[in-house]
Amino acid sequence: MKQDPDKSPLNFSNRAFKWLVILMSVFLLIEIPLLISHARHAYFKIDGWFAFYALLGLIACAILVVLARALGGLVRRDKSYYGNQEEESLPEDLDERLR
Amino acid sequence: MNDFADFPPALILFAGALLVPLLKPSWRPVYLILLPLATLFYILQLKTGNGWQFDLFSFAKEPVEFLRVDTLSKAFGIIFSLNAVAAFIYAFYYKKSTQHVAALFYIGGAIGTVFAGDLLSMYVFWESMAVSSTFVILARNTEQAKGAAFRYIMIHLVGGLLLLAGVILTIAQQDGSIAFNGFDFETANHAGTWLILIGILVNCGAPPLSAWLPDSYPAASVTGGLILSAYTTKTAVYTLLRGYPGWEPLIWIGCAMAVYGVIYALMESDIRRILAYAIINQVGFMVCAAGVGTHEAISGATAAAFCHILYKSLLWMTTGVVLYRLGKSRLSDLGGLYRTMPVTTVFFLIGCLSMALPGTCGFTSKNIIIHAIEHEHLFWPWLLLEISAAGIFLAVAIRLPYFLFFGKDKGLTPKDAPITMLGGMALLGFFCLFFGVAPGTLYDLLPYKIDFHPYSLAKITMVMQWILASGIAFLFLKKWLAPKPGISLDFDWFYRKGSMQFYRAADTILNGANVLAKRFFIDGVVKSVCNFFESGGSHTAAWVMTPIWMLQGRSAVDIDHLQQSLFKRSKRGAFPIGITAFCAVILLGLLSIIFLLEKP
């Protein structure tokens, strides 16, 4: 059975995004030796740790996504919550001949 | 000092706006591009100094000054007019002149505010901005836009009134001086400056006064939203940098904005609402920098505002193309658009990567703020901003392009952007990259010279680490980040739903109290008093006379008859004159006795 591409990591529906992942991995490969060879001036001690910013990025994203999900459970409502159905489309905005 | 011939640059746009309806529709688009272009060149040649001063108010110590040119106002003036040029190229085929006129007044108001020399001139331009921006929203002319515009103007009128109250109190506190320079946190910490600050924070989109932004900007038209996204919040940032450098609470307000913006941006499913929350997040960085208040922080905030306008406008433009071509703005309805919209996709990627990637303007500007905070050793603000920087990159630069342009193909095959829209995007895309590779040009525009070198290996590896980390985080959290249907409630709930419930509660409580009061006073007390004055006398008389009649040996029927006749006479006022006169004499006699007894 074909897996839903949006539901599993490392499995994407298109080639373009796969290339982005490959590009990121290449960056990562360049990054690691640079990290080892160059120590950054630390202002707060912890930012001098090895790969501190990578760790920060990972933890930050995880925490924020969990928070967003938890808050989403509390504040998400049907789109007709405020009475009016959300309007879409703005075709009237621009000249017809462009469409 | 500027001579009188140097007029406020806003006048070009104000005067120009009045001519728009008179022009032939075919000339209008070119005229609309030339106006901000002329403003841009005019601002570029302005020399540092003050001008256009008028003695308008007797209470003010100094004349009202409509032109103050220095490096800070010039930097904001340049980016405001540059962005307007790109926006009008993008809106080349937009036909509604009402929106164009409102937009020109709005941009003029924003430029007027940054060049205003004192509190009073600043307030005038500030309010003109609030009014004209409401018309920009209204120009879309849908029910949603009307509702959003109403809420928008209500919030901004409240903000404007607070600002006005603050301005009046501050002028009184400054002994009639209308000067608007940096307020000192220690000496100028009074109600006036705080009210001005709250008024400014409304325009910044600081929570809980923030919900107007994601409510109103997506309700405007494609081009209206684009124009709105640049000016209100950045003008507010300018006023904070001008008036409130070093006000410590701003550091924490900025951090709150950054975190709040990123959480909502991660939660939202509507592309323009995501961008609206991203604005709050990015403005949070600038507010925080204003709170730090060092020269490096002020310059960093100016650079960040400058670059934020560039890449955020580019993002509004590219998402505007999607909206214009498909009429859809929910991520859950979109996907796989890169196949038929490759050029828009490239410009979108330039815009979103410009938030942080080395080689773009976000990298060369936002890191100045981070650097300034590191220099001041502010650990928690630094950590919160770094966390939200990674988070907003995940939300806008990874999640948004993935679900919008890549991701699951929804079978949509829209055409790519029209040539004029591409023109606007190309102009901003160019500057996003230009200020990324040649940051010196940007740094020359900043209010204070800074010793900041973005392209050190340490800084590049630092940023690349969390960029890659957020990419990896996305791979594993993709399921949780998938767009969901529905809307997210924000602080606007309090006035959209909460106010209705408040109304109902007030209705129940106050009208209930009203009914109770009616029952007690009108039906109870007043009625009894009326009864007393109507028949109190006859009842008293009957009460006195009945025992006498009984002693006289009258029958019960007789007594009843006498009582009824007493009541009737009392009601009609028809007692025989003799009895009345007798009672009056007795009453006078009693009064005389009391009077005599009272006398010592």
Image: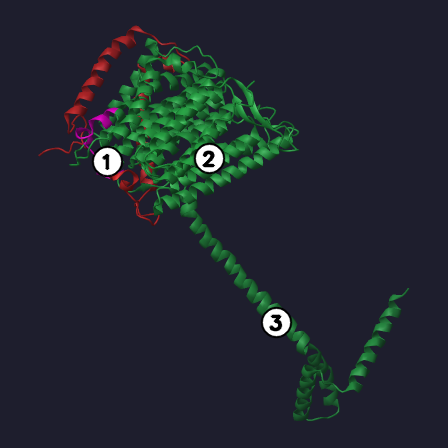
Chain colours: A red, B green
Q: Are marks 1 and 2 in contact (CB under 8 Å)?
A: no
What span is in magenta?
B324-346
Q: Where's residue B441, x and y in %?
A: 39, 13
Image quarter (top left, top right, bottom left or bottom right) of the N terminus of chain B = top right
Q: Chain of mark 1?
A: A
Picture coordinates of residue B345, whole percent (x, y): 23, 27
* Residue B489: x %, y % from top left: 36, 41
Q: Residues within 10 Å of mark 2 (few under 14, many from 20)?
A: many
Residue at 40% from the left image edge and 16% from the top image edge: B442
- Residue closer to the observer: B61 or B105: B105
Please check the rendered image and state whether residue B343 is part of the magenta-colored stretch, yes or no: yes
Rendered position, B149 above or below B48: below
Q: Residue at x 86, y 69 (%)?
A: B595
For residue A60, say whether it is visible.
Answer: no
Q: Main secondary structure of the magenta part?
A: helix
Q: Is residue B73 above or below residue B191?
A: above
* Residue furthest right as drawn: B600
| Residue at disc 3, secondary structure | helix
- What numbered label is drawn on residue B527? 3
Location of residue B399 (image quadrant): top left
Identity of the amino acid at label 3?
Lys
Figure quadrant of the C terminus of chain B: bottom right
In this picture, residue B506 sits left or right of residue A42:
right
Mark 2 chain = B
Please tell me in which quadrant of the rendered image residue B97 appears.
top left
Q: Amino acid at mark 1?
A: Leu
What residue do we see at 87% from left, 66% from top? B598
In the image, residue B217 sits, relative to residue B395, either above or below, namely: below
* Precedes in sequence: disc 2 or disc 3: 2
